[in-house]
């Protein structure tokens, strides 16, 4: 059961028993006794079996950290220096160790002095393990390590821009700064960050595991978008760019470059985490998964009018949408090499809604000039044009029927005609080319009649009857009235032509 000889085990047990009963005293140079100071922070460390326990101990002169006891079938004696010390115990490797060399790999932050091995062949069991610090056989402080059962809970994904380096994205700060929810998709060439949400697995993490047939745990990427009878593309966690843990978060992460591993735009994948039934981590098979789709790196500019050209006018904001991960950058420029040439460039950041925008000032560019809007990263060009100012169209207001009179080409206006209600007199006179005057018969708005101007030949109202310029009688009218009626009829006929 133990790699140590029976005498070594007995000696270690004796040391532990003595440490529990001898008073903790130290003698100063002046002969005065002073109590040694030792503390565990926290005094009880909780962790899942298979994970790495972080034990923090502070002493004022160093000593020996003891973990476990013969009754636990596991114990360690680790030398620590004075001050604040952090000891890490890999509870997976410690339970699997078969030699001193393997046990030393399970510990960091102190020097292994004594140890007892077990035939667990699996992580340290779920139990309470006593801890204390001794010096010169004296117990200076106590604590406890409590290991609980582990579990597997799920797989989740996040994404990060391709411009972020693998080292930067594989840290707690990098994850918090660059990692965003994918919404079910990731742009080709961006990072896919997979979180395996499981406890009790950190101790077993190694570059050699997570492969297809690993008997501890596996991470499989299986294409689900294949055609009938076609073999799906597959790759495994051991091929990921990075496998890492993030602070005190449970489980571990994988950083996958979606431009590698045979991935193509349009592919869909299922990401599986499997703990086989034969694994030392479990008594039964565990399997959880998540799905993700890989899409083209697409950047689209919003049109602001009919056709393909983007119309600009003065300071113009150009907007668009994209499949790129929020936080990605897009290089966009407006340029034309005609005379005089111009070039305006911007670098914009994709928002959380996968949109972007930037403003260019085209105030100094002549109307109607065509140019290119370039998306250099996508090797795309969209035509643009400076708006042409519309020519003002002359409009003629409709005449106001209450103030406008139609002129008679045979008359000269001598007064302005004003429309009034029917009971209002119209004060208008017109002089015709024949020397006649039009005037109202009375003070009502009735048709005008005509009368001859008095002269020497007809002042007495009589006619010479001989055609010497006399008026031709009109039946029903006097000679003068008949002449006026005839002239009036001629004028009406002339107006109707």
Image: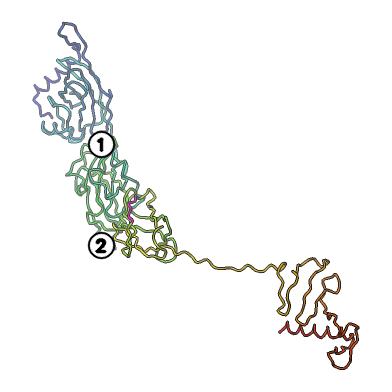
35 or 305: which is nearer to us? 305
In x, y percent, where is residue 203? 21, 36
Residue 56 location, quadrant: top left
Q: Which of the two discs, 1 and 2, labels the residue nearer the N terminus?
A: 1
Residue at 9 percent of width and 22 percent of height: 8
- Does the magenta portion include 58? no
In x, y percent, where is residue 411? 73, 78
Judge whether 434 appears above or below 352 on screen. below
Q: Main secondary structure of the magenta part?
A: strand
Label 1 sits on residue: 200
In x, y percent, where is residue 224? 29, 56
Query: Which region shows up in magenta?
Result: 344-349
Label 2 Cα neighbours within 10 Å, binned few <14 / some 14-19 / many ≥20: few
Judge whether 92 appears above or below 372 on screen. above
Q: Residue furthest front?
A: 456
Name the quadrant of the C terminus: bottom right
Residue 263 location, quadrant: bottom left
Secondary structure of residue under mark 1: loop
37 or 114: which is nearer to us? 37
Residue at 12 percent of width and 28 percent of height: 2
């Amino acid at each position: 059961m133990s790699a140590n000889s029976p005498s070594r085990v007995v000696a270690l047990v004796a040391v532990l028993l003595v440490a529990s009963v001898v008073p903790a005293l130290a003698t100063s140079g002046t002969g005065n006794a002073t109590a040694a100071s030792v503390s565990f922070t926290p005094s009880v460390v909780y962790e899942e079996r298979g994970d790495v326990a972080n034990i923090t101990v502070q002493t004022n002169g160093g000593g020996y950290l003891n973990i476990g006891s013969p009754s636990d079938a596991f114990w360690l004696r680790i030398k620590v220096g004075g001050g604040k010390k952090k000891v890490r115990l890999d509870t997976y490797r410690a339970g699997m160790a078969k030699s001193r060399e393997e046990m030393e790999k399970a510990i960091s932050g102190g020097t292994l002095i004594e140890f007892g091995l077990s035939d667990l062949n699996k992580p340290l069991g779920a139990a309470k393990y006593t801890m204390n610090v001794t010096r010169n056989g004296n117990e200076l402080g106590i604590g406890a390590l409590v290991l609980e059962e582990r579990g597997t809970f799920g797989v989740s994904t996040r994404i990060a821009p391709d411009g972020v380096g693998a080292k930067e994205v594989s840290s707690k700060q990098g994850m918090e700064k660059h990692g965003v929810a994918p919404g079910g998709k990731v742009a080709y060439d961006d990072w896919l960050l997979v979180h395996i949400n499981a406890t009790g697995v950190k101790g077993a993490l190694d570059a050699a595991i997570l492969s297809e047939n690993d008997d501890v745990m596996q991470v499989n990427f299986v294409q689900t978008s294949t055609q009938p009878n076609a073999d799906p593309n597959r790759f495994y966690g051991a091929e990921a760019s990075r496998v890492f843990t993030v602070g005190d978060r449970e489980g571990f992460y994988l950083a996958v470059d979606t431009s590698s591993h045979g991935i193509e735009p349009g592919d869909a994948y299922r990401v599986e985490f499997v703990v086989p039934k034969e694994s030392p981590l479990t008594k039964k098979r565990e399997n959880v998964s998540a799905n993700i789709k890989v899409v083209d790196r697409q950047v689209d500019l919003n049109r602001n009018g009919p056709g393909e050209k983007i119309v600009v006018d003065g300071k113009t904001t150009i907007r668009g949408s994209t499949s790129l991960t929020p936080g990605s950058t897009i290089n966009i420029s407006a340029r034309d090499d005609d005379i005089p040439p111009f070039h305006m460039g911007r670098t914009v950041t994709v928002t959380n809604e996968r949109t972007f925008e930037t403003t260019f000032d085209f105030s100094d560019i002549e109307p109607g000039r065509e140019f290119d809007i370039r998306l250099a990263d996508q090797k795309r060009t969209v035509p643009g044009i400076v708006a042409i100012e519309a020519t003002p169209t002359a409009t003629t207001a409709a005449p106001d029927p209450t103030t406008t009179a139609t002129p008679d080409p045979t008359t000269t206006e001598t007064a302005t005609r004003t429309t009034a209600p029917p009971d209002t007199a119209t004060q208008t006179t017109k002089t015709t080319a024949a020397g006649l005057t039009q005037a109202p018969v009375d003070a009502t708005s009735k048709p005008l009649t005509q009368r001859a101007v008095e002269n020497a030949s007809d002042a007495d109202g009589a006619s010479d009857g001989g055609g010497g310029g006399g008026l031709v009688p009109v039946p029903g009218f006097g000679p003068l009235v008949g002449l006026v009626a005839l002239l009036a009829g001629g004028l009406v006929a002339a107006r109707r032509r």
